Amino acid sequence: FEALNSRAMEKPKESHEMKKLKAFLEAAPKEQAQLHAKIINISKRVNFLHNLNKEVPDEDMLLNTKTYMWPEKIVPVLDTAMERIVNQEERMEDALRARQKKFEDEVTATTEELQSFAQCG
């Protein structure tokens, strides 16, 4: 879950980094489901130890508690990260369209200028 969290919090600067992060975020629910299955398995083991009246050290219990709570905490992190990536993707696409429009305008102006030279000569 820590790996999911740290990866989701990345802020890509390049479009290829953004696409990789978006693909990661889209695949995250599958990984999250696998981790949740592991948590359930660990929970069964801890319950087994409790049923045998075995003591589990406090630090292990604290770690287990944090682990049980992670699925609830990671979902909003992943949702926020995906929303941020989609917004960033839209901004990058808008910037690209603006650059494309500027380039097209420059090509049109240059073409018109060349045509005016052809008429003079």
Image: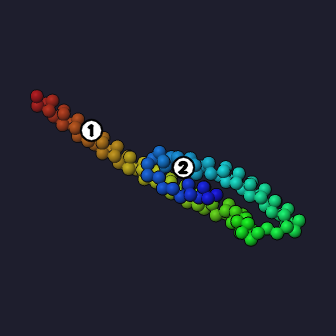
- SS of the residue at dot 1? helix
Inter-mark Cα distance, 2 to 1: 34 Å
Spot occupied by residue 35 in the image (x, y as percentages of width and height): 70, 54
Q: What residue sits 18% from the left and 33% below the top?
A: 114
- Residue at 67% x, 62% y is 70
**Which element type, helix, strand or loop, lies under badge 2?**
helix
Q: Looking at the image, which residue is at 60% across and 55% down?
A: 3
- Between label 2 and label 1, give the one nearer the viewer: 2
**Residue 75 sits above or below residue 98 on the image:** below
Above or below, comparing residue 11 to residue 54 in the picture: above
Residue 90 in view in this figure: no
Name the one closer to the observer, 102 or 79.
79
Quadrant placement of the N terminus = bottom right
Q: What residue is shown at x 50% (from left), y 53% (from top)? A: 86
Query: Where does the image place residue 40, in percent across and percent down from the top left?
Result: 77, 58
Q: Which residue is mark 2?
A: 22
**Side of 113 relative to 58 (left or right):** left
* Pointer 2 or 1: first along the chain: 2
- Which residue is disc 1 drawn over? 107
Under mark 1, the amino acid is Val
In this orientation, which residue lies closer to the viewer: 100 or 43? Answer: 43
The residue closer to the viewer here, 2 or 96, is: 2
Dividing the picture into quadrants, the one containing residue 47 is bottom right
Q: Is residue 100 left or right of residue 115?
A: right
The local crowd at label 2, few if under 14, some if 14 to 19, many if 20 or more residues have their Cα within 10 Å, is many
| Residue type at numbered disc 2 | Lys
Q: Residue 73, image x and y in percent?
A: 64, 64
Q: Position of residue 71 (x, y in %)?
A: 68, 60
Horizontally, residue 49 falls left or right of residue 94, namely right
